[in-house]
Image (tube, rainbow, N blue to C red):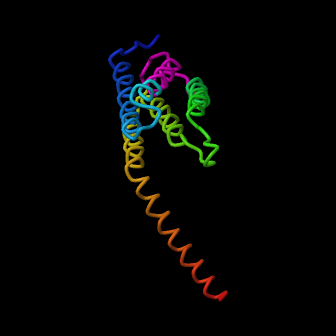
């Protein structure tokens, strides 16, 4: 007997993916990055949609093929890499790479979309919280550790210079 599609559940999963992707995109946009709410909202929505399509839009646990779901996940993760690669840029003047965090945020947003498509709200919410926590704390922590490391390196250089004299 064929399973009935619960369209309200499908809609809830799609809306959650769109919302979570939009939240990540909002952070990126507020920090002047290339992606924003629309882009990352679409990434999460598309990942959720293709995940549910592999489940034939039947949301009851155990009523879909885990093998098909696995193949779709692999395809989404591989495919999203091309989108992420499009935002990575090498500045030849400074030899610095820009866009890596944006590319990674595109990738993790797709992953969150997959989890939303699977209907695992708690895991999706935990992942979203961790992404936002990293966005808030990551830069200040990196700056603090970099400054601390640089001070240590400066002190070591000063000591070497004194010993040479």
Residue occupying the point 53% across, 20% down: 54
Q: Please state the horizontal and vertical placement of residue 107, each as a whole percent of the image.
A: 52, 35
| Residue bounds of the magenta highlight | 44-67
Residue occupying the point 40% across, 56% down: 140
Q: Is residue 55 magenta?
A: yes
Q: Nearer the viewer, residue 59 or 79?
A: 79
Position of residue 18 relative to residue 1, above or below, is below
Residue occupying the point 37% across, 32% down: 20
Tag count in the figure?
0
Q: Please state the horizontal and vertical placement of residue 8, each as a whole percent of the image.
A: 32, 17
The C terminus lies in quadrant? bottom right
Q: Is residue 65 magenta?
A: yes
Report the side of 154 relative to 8 (left or right).
right
Q: Nearer the viewer, residue 94 or 1?
A: 94
Is residue 106 shown to the viewer in this render? yes
Q: Nearer the viewer, residue 36 or 164?
A: 164
Report the side of 58 relative to 68 (left or right).
left
Position of residue 74 relative to residue 101, above or below, is above
Q: Give the quarter of the image for residue 21.
A: top left
Q: Give the quarter of the image for residue 6.
A: top left
Q: Please state the horizontal and vertical placement of residue 69, each as a whole percent of the image.
A: 55, 26
Q: Please state the horizontal and vertical placement of residue 91, each as a whole percent of the image.
A: 60, 42
């Amino acid at each position: 007997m064929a399973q009935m599609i619960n369209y309200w559940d499908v809609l809830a999963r799609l809306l959650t993916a769109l919302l979570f992707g939009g939240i990540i995109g909002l952070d990126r946009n507020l920090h002047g990055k290339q992606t924003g709410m629309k882009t990352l909202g679409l990434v999460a929505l598309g990942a959720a949609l293709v995940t549910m399509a592999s489940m034939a839009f039947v949301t009851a646990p155990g009523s879909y093929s885990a093998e098909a779901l696995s193949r779709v996940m692999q395809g989404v993760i591989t495919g999203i890499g091309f989108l992420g690669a499009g935002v990575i840029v090498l500045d030849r003047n400074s030899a610095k790479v820009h866009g890596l965090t944006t590319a990674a945020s595109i990738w993790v947003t797709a992953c969150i979309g997959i989890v939303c498509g699977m209907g695992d709200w708690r895991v999706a919410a935990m992942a979203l919280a961790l992404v936002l926590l990293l966005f808030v704390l990551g830069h200040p922590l990196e700056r603090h550790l970099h400054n601390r490391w640089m001070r240590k390196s400066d002190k070591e250089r000063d000591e070497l210079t004194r010993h040479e004299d």
